[in-house]
Image (cartoon, grey):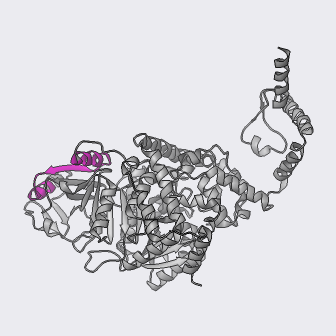
Amino acid sequence: MTVADQPSFKARADAALADRTLKTAIERTTGTAERKRAAALSTFPEFEAARSRGKAIKDHVIANLDHYLETFERNAVASGARVHWAATDEEARDIVVRLCIEAGAKRVTRSKSMLGEEIGLPQALADAGIERVETDLAEHIIQLAGEHPSHIIWPAMHRTREQVAELFKADHVPAPDAEDPASMVQSARRVLREKFLSADVGISGANFLIADTGATCTVTNEGNAELTTTPPRVHIVTAGIEKLVPSTAHAFALLRLLVRSATGGELTQYTTFHCGPKRSGDADGPEEMHIVLVDNGRSTMIADEFREMLRCIRCGACMNHCVVYRQIGGHAYGGTYPGPMGAALTPVLDGLARSRDLAFACTMNGRCAEVCPVKIPLPTLLRAWRVRSWNDGLEKGVASAAVGAWAAVARRPGLYRLVSGAGVGILRLIGTTGWIKSLPFVGGWTKYRDLPAPSGGTFMARYKAERGKEAAK
Amino acid sequence: MSARDRILAAVRAGLGSRPQAPSDIEAEAASLLAEPDEIRPRPVDTTLVEAFCTKAGAVGTTIDRVTDLDAVPAAVERYLAAQGLPPSVAVQPDPALTGLGWEGVATHAAIAPDEAAAVGLAGWGIAEGGSIVIHSAPDSPILLAFLPVHHIVVLHTDRILPHLEDYAATLSEGGAVPRNAVLITGPSGTTDIEGSYVRGAHGPGFVHVILVAGEVR
């Protein structure tokens, strides 16, 4: 999914802000996630040290990425898997669709993978006339709704239980027994069970690629990954090249960070290492295993400041703690990945010209960087996108003219004192109650909240006055 | 140029020139696993078995303890009765299990899509998170751990390891990595509807460990 051909970010954010149901849905899930994460960390005093180590592991992998890619490929091939390389999203889609067609696939089950969304796999399978069955409960919900994920851990978090009940009642035969989450989960289990066992191909992502064994690792709570990858004749994995780790033990060090940061658990219910196809005599497993290694812009991030973003382990903590995400939800961001990590990554995937707004949808409060389990300096990266957008001449209109005017005035201290003094005086005149309800040029701000009126004069005026008092003593 | 060559060339261009030999890279990777106690939770109890039981219980796994493998069928019978289930289970086709005296319980090998209960052997237990580990093999179908509603797992106490790294070490020492290695930490669940937890999604809604004292036979 890309930000192309969508209404402007401002229009998307406005629509989200006007949606009261959305606000309820977002608050229910992110609020719970924030509390559970805090509880998990309170019993894990080693978190800070683990975080530093996690950062070091990912930095080490990226610094030696060519070595690890080749090592992984060698070991995966030795296990009997076939490794494919895709430089772009289009190449990745083509490879997966070709493999499905070669397998004679009519029905494909899919275990949730954000990379699959990134490369547009759902649409590509539909275009090829292949039935796609999403098996993760949240992905099942949004497939029924014809939507895209709004969160990387809880793709359907924008939907309330009442809305999910409507979808299930319309689609499930028999319909769910009741509208509580437990009854709806049972209904999905019933409906999907037969599809798991009759699929021709199972497609999964990977949370980690283990270089020294050639295995791919998935983590899930529902058990849908194993039911997706075990019964079909062919298992296809799509994974970004940054998912590599040196060994299983390194994956575990990162897993401790990932699960606590994502759901507040210590481990997901299922952590599975998939190493090649069915072995001779094995009781079950796929006859073929294919691994598609996807670059799609990642290699271009290595040489600049966005290299830090390659550490991301996709836990979603940054969005759960983001004041902007919690107001507008994931869809308003427009790309595959929402929230702070999405705002940092989308310009790489979809181009800065189409996504320049995202870097500005940020208050710079730093919460995302504080909670990031691999210490990605997200505000710094968003600031870097702002600078690039300015340098590329993408900043136009009122904001650009205003910053230009400010810069011209700020270079002349006398003029700056005069203008800022006058400005403060005018704002105090308008905001006699201490708050300003509307103001020309900043309607985007005052539409949703009042602007505080200045409580005193300018800093320079105050400074001079204080100096005067000192001198008089 | 193939996509593989293009990607590797782009990666190398981004990294610039580096003198790192593979052996140096491996040494650096190993150094990142030094002092593991600094980056993992401390065990909760004094003995490994108690630690495992506490953590497994915390994630919703129930535990029964028997002194001998021969006592497993009776323990399974007890569990099925307590759950109000008929005395019938799918049993993993491992001779260590099929060879036991299943007088009170009807057993079968094939696992039905809606199997009520199945009994399998765990390769390992990991105390850190209360996990059990299943490896695929000719006599170990992976679906046995995913299709039933009740997954009953037989685990020998001397197969309990303290930490995740200890399990990882068994893989590198043994040399043979199975096709599928699954760490199971509690029953299947989901929080996909409004973040509220529901037990029993696609996998088993119940995981019941029968801990057998002593060595693997």
- Decide which of A424, A430 is in the foreground and name it: A424
Q: Nearer the viewer, residue A29 or A42?
A: A42
Instruction: Characterize the magenta stretch by its predominant secondary structure.
Output: helix
Residue A451, horizontal then vertical, whole percent:
76, 36
Instruction: Please tell me whether residue B206 is drawn above or below residue A466 in the rendered image.
Output: below
Total marks placed: 0
Answer with left or right where residue A374 lies relative to residue B186: right
Confirm whether residue A132 shows in the render.
Answer: yes
Name the quadrant containing residue A247: bottom left
Residue B67 highlighted magenta (yes or no)? yes
Is the C terminus of chain A in the top left, top right, bottom left or bottom right quadrant?
top right
Query: Is B21 rendered above or below residue A184?
Result: below
What x and y, as percent, mark residue A296? 59, 71
The answer to whether residue A309 is magenta is no
Where does the magenta region start and end?
B48-76
Relative height, residue B158 to residue B17 (above, below): above
Say which quadrant the N terminus of chain A sits in. bottom right
Q: Where's residue A392, x and y in %? A: 78, 62
Q: Which corner quadrant of the image does residue A41 belong to?
A: top left
Q: Quadrant of residue A108?
A: bottom left
Residue A132: x and y in percent read 48, 72
**Near-viewer residue (A115 or A146):** A115
